[in-house]
Image (spheres, coloured by chain):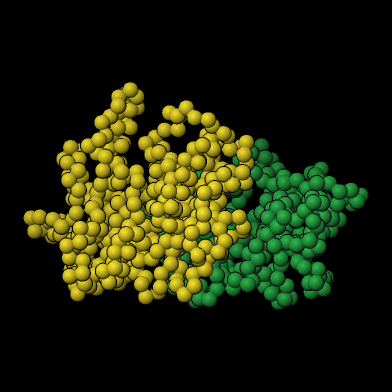
Chain colours: A yellow, B green
Amino acid sequence: MLEDKNIHKTSLEQIGEFGLIDILTQGFPLRNPSSLKGIGDDGAVIDFAHEKAVISTDLLIEGVHFNLSYMPLKHLGYKAVMVNLSDIYAMNAIATQITVSIAVSNRFPLEALEELYEGIRLACDIYKVDLVGGDTTSSLRGLIISVTSIGKAPLEKIVYRNGAKENDLIVVSGDLGSAYMGLQVLERENEVFKVNPNLQPDLEPYQYLIERQLKPEARKDIVLLLEKLGVKPTSMMDISDGLSSELLHICKQSQVGCRLMEEKIPLDPVLINACEEFNLSSTMVALSGGEDYELLFTISQADYDKIKGNPNLSVIGYITDASQGCNLITRANEAIPLEARGWNAFR
Amino acid sequence: MLEDKNIHKTSLEQIGEFGLIDILTQGFPLRNPSSLKGIGDDGAVIDFAHEKAVISTDLLIEGVHFNLSYMPLKHLGYKAVMVNLSDIYAMNAIATQITVSIAVSNRFPLEALEELYEGIRLACDIYKVDLVGGDTTSSLRGLIISVTSIGKAPLEKIVYRNGAKENDLIVVSGDLGSAYMGLQVLERENEVFKVNPNLQPDLEPYQYLIERQLKPEARKDIVLLLEKLGVKPTSMMDISDGLSSELLHICKQSQVGCRLMEEKIPLDPVLINACEEFNLSSTMVALSGGEDYELLFTISQADYDKIKGNPNLSVIGYITDASQGCNLITRANEAIPLEARGWNAFR
């Protein structure tokens, strides 16, 4: 990706750490009144007033979490922020600040990092969060990004993973599995490219899947929608590892069981086509493919009328007593125990 | 370090990411009433009540920031927390929470990470901070640690870097340069060890220096002391890159100059001896050696009587008008412009 471009390259050695910080953090105004002090001191200062603070952090490693041969740096910057904001929204809170730390090897010129920060800046603009701090250092190999996001909410609005109750409905936003299939498409094309760099793949039919992989959006809109609808979920989390694994987390922490209806899992038609082409079960992809960053939550049955028919939300099952276990109810009406087949960093 | 020990090793693959998190985060009770929700959800929840939140973050990379051939993992865990808490104290705030993210390659067995977390736990115990979150993932190479620390202070107590005024006194806690010389000693012994692993070096004379390098303490005690003395610094930061570089930061951000008196810089006798042995100028080591994590601050002259004679604090110079520049006044009474020769990650 980097090597393809015939642009001017400025070495990081030339500008030094403080010069780099100055350049990269240009164009990050503080928008939130709660951001009392941003970059430039030992710490940032934040005023949460009468609200509670919500904090989450993620570490992204080149070669483990992303591959720069098909991940443009601007998208990577955007996605690194999305992944993190998603955790704040999953608490039913609103993200207000982030810190971004990066470690880079010398192979990255300044221009590459500016591209990365362009994506970070775009994310801050759209989601109205302030970059208030970070660390910039060198790595022996590859790019490392650590993002911490900070949000706020009144205590009574915050939703944990452990509040699901028997008979609650299981709801998911958007559709599932597409980010995973986007990755499959990109990896296939990357293999083809390695064999013959002159082949120009036609990625048009897979555009939706690729966008879901390269430029996911955190569902701030769902948090706002739920507030507007007057619905407070009983439990909530974001789907980063796959529906199956996340639903098991909710059930374990809430000490309940669940029945997940296969036929209700929202799938995009593009995903269904790609699964056929790749000879994969679309249900399996939706259950175990990660990185959708949709919100998975449970609501009381009394709230059903408030969300009914909303195109952003799908009811995909219901919560049972713990003794009934966690099951997928297939189209053939068979109950299969749910398994956590999500991403495991150490496998 | 790791390879020397004949201990049972459990592969991370065996226990998986969630198993690892469960094991590592045992024994981290929440002590601060402000920690409403710690590990185990999408985010931690913190109640800052009427106080402001202070946030800081650092990224530590094996081979760049630490060398495991002479840095025991327990010390590394402790130091990683200290480095970060130091930034919170440098804001005149009290640290209350941390998040710790780690990325490790497969060469680390569980037992190594448990050692690391033992140091983190010790730091949390002594400094009364709560571990409330983090991320655990794999790396292609080496160990990566990202710590975010969170603290609190009433707005009127927070001290920035930009408040130094003409005629203010420049004060530093503890003594300087020892952490840097500790590193020199360790690196020399490491070279000797590579040549002949059977040589047992006598590190006894350098114990103070090595301890300053391997097990630094963040100066929470100074923040408490200043409060007790009724002194609010006009500016403050911690010394991570070296006195010279940090003092220049304060002067630049405060738009002032300074006169730093060479004879007043606090040096430990062990440091002076080691500098002679290594043929290094102890003043240069104090000015440019980093990692002391002492606090550098300025106070109004009116506060001088309150700190006078305190063994933890040394007045090392005073603030001037910006037009006079930033100078070191040598023992020979010469004025030499201060230069930032601190650590640059990209050199």
Q: Quadrant of residue B157?
A: bottom right
Position of B158 relative to B216 (above/below): below
> Could you tell me residue A287's position as x and y percent?
23, 53
Q: How many marks?
A: 0
Asked whether the viewer can see residue B265, the reply is no
Left-right relation of A310 to B229 = left
Q: Quadrant of residue B56?
A: bottom right
- Give x and y (percent) for residue A280: 19, 42
**Residue A32 vertical placement versus A179 (above, below):** below
Q: Nearer the viewer, residue B309 or A117?
A: A117
Residue plotted at (81% across, 60% down): B318
Above or below, A181 against B311 in this view is: above
Q: Nearer the viewer, residue B243 or B162?
A: B162
Q: Position of residue B66 (x, y in %)?
A: 60, 48
Is residue B108 left or right of A69 when viewed as pictured?
A: right
Q: Nearer the viewer, residue A15 or B244?
A: A15
> Which residue, as the protein is rendered here, is positioned at the far left?
A332
Q: Nearer the viewer, residue B305 or B95?
A: B305
Q: Is residue B313 visible?
A: yes
Residue B235 pos. (x, y %):
70, 63
The quarter of the picture where residue B227 lies is: bottom right
Q: Which quadrant holds the C terminus of chain B?
A: top right
Residue at 49% x, 37% y: name it.
Answer: A112
Residue shown at the point (72%, 45%) measured from the top left: B341
Q: Which residue is rendered at x = 23% and y = 58% of the image? A: A312
Q: Left or right of A260: which side holds B342?
A: right
